[in-house]
Amino acid sequence: MNASLVAHPEREELLLFGGEYFNGQRTFVYNDLYVYNIKKNCWTKVSIPNAPAPRCAHQAVVVPSAGGQMWIFGGEFASPNGEIFYHYKDLWVLHLSTRTWEEVSDFVYHNDLHIFDMDTFSWTRVTSIGSAPTPRSGCAILPTPDSTGLIVYGGYTKQRVKKDVEKGVVHVDMFLLNPEGKEGKWRWSRLSPVGSAPSPRSGFTMVPGPSGRMFLFGGVRDEEEEESLEGEFFNDLFAYDVAKNRWILPRLRGHDTGDGHRWKQQEKASIELKGGATGGQSQESEIAATESHVDDVKEVEMDDGTVFTVRQSIGGQQTRTSSTTKELDGEKQVEEEKVRAESWPCARMNVMLAVRHGVMFLYGGAYEIGDRQVTLADMYALDLHKLDAWHTLLEPDPKESQWLEEESSESEEGESEEECQGAAGGQKEKNEEADEDDDEDEEDDDEKEDDDH
């Protein structure tokens, strides 16, 4: 009882969602969806992932928009023993054409800060002055090397650009929170780091490391259109030097030479001219040698004495290509790209990072291929003192990243016919049994007539 029952806007079907049942002792609340076929007089249970929580006494309405939609608002829930009871105020839409649930929420972002006292097990809201970060989600919050303050970097928010259109905003600002004078007073300051900062992204992970540096890995940049969302994933590594207020692109000095299969990502190569046969390094080259964003830099000398520096870019970032007297041999580019792809974890977002004894451990994460999300369970280690190479601890296993596609509408219709039972199912069997009995009676009558003759 107290379920919702509405008519499909286009098909000869009724849609029943939720409801409750009381057996005299316990109450059961449901979030099942059933479809009643009017022509076939049968019920079919339809399982759709990410459905609203179990509820009853909610409101439902259907509209023909976008191939048909069923909207659900509110409702109430009671636990079987009746000890838990509450009301919903959420709004959901079931897209009938694609059979997908979507929650429509009014998002609220916050920028308040609280301190937890581990001695008294109590929370205290921080009263601060200065330029605080704007409300956001997904930002990095790390302690300063002296453990007296906090660094806040990046984040993500959504803004409503039209009545029914939202657009994501990626933040790239950085803030410092330090104690101010008396105990319990804090001040926010906005930082403007120099150096090579990460490109705008969300879903990155940042951890404190040795030598007063913080390390950032990966992330994703979404390209949003009205009808599509494309993500560019990264596997680049950045370091932020707190004392110098500077972003650095670490250069790894070697490559992981361990055996085993590595997932290869499409990468790009950039070529920079160093000079003639005896040309020295420029100032830019010297800086790049210590704070380069590439994991490998190799020099290639041509027959005419021209020397090239070949650099591998990271995570699909755009790279600069200077004019050269001759192009690098194609096979050499392929070889360099292969070495680069086999040495680093593949591009991903939401990785898990931890640092112990100066070694940064990277585990898992995810990336997307079209509508498919691949969840990873591989593991790597990087010595942040040596910055020599990524070492593979657990190989990526494609079998652990299975993606279950939704069944096609044709197969669902076929299964629906097999599952159709209830109002018409039992009657159909009875009719078939009655027909068999009639046939047997006719055969008996024919035999009797033959005996009479």
Image (tube, rainbow, N blue to C red):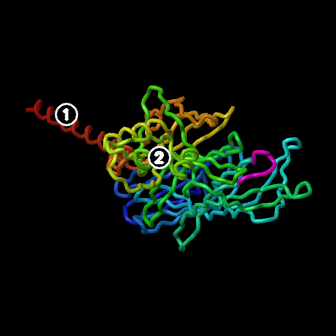
Residue drawn at point x = 83 percent, y = 50 percent: 123
Query: Which comes sooner in the sequence, label 2 or label 1?
Result: 2
Residue 373: mark: 2
Numbered-mark total = 2
User: Taking 177 as reference, is 9 left or right?
Assistant: left
Q: Is residue 117 rendered magenta in the image?
A: no
Decide: marks 2, 1 in contact (CB < 8 A)?
Answer: no
User: Taking 190 as reference, is 63 left or right?
Assistant: left
Instruction: Provide the residue designation for mark 1.
Output: 444
At numbered mark 2, what does the secondary structure look like: helix, strand or loop?
strand
Q: Which corner quadrant of the image does residue 207 belong to?
A: top right
Q: Position of residue 20 (x, y in %)?
A: 60, 51
Query: The residue under label 1 is which amino acid type?
Result: Asp
Reply above or below: 128 against 368: below
Magenta stretch prevailing secondary structure: loop
Q: Position of residue 262 (x, y in %)?
A: 44, 34
Given residues 371 and 378, the one toward you in this image is 378
The span from disc 2 to disc 1 (Cα, nearest Å) is: 66 Å
- The answer to whether one can see residue 349 in this image is no
Specify the segment rendered in magenta.
144-151
Given residues 164 and 311, the one toward you in this image is 311
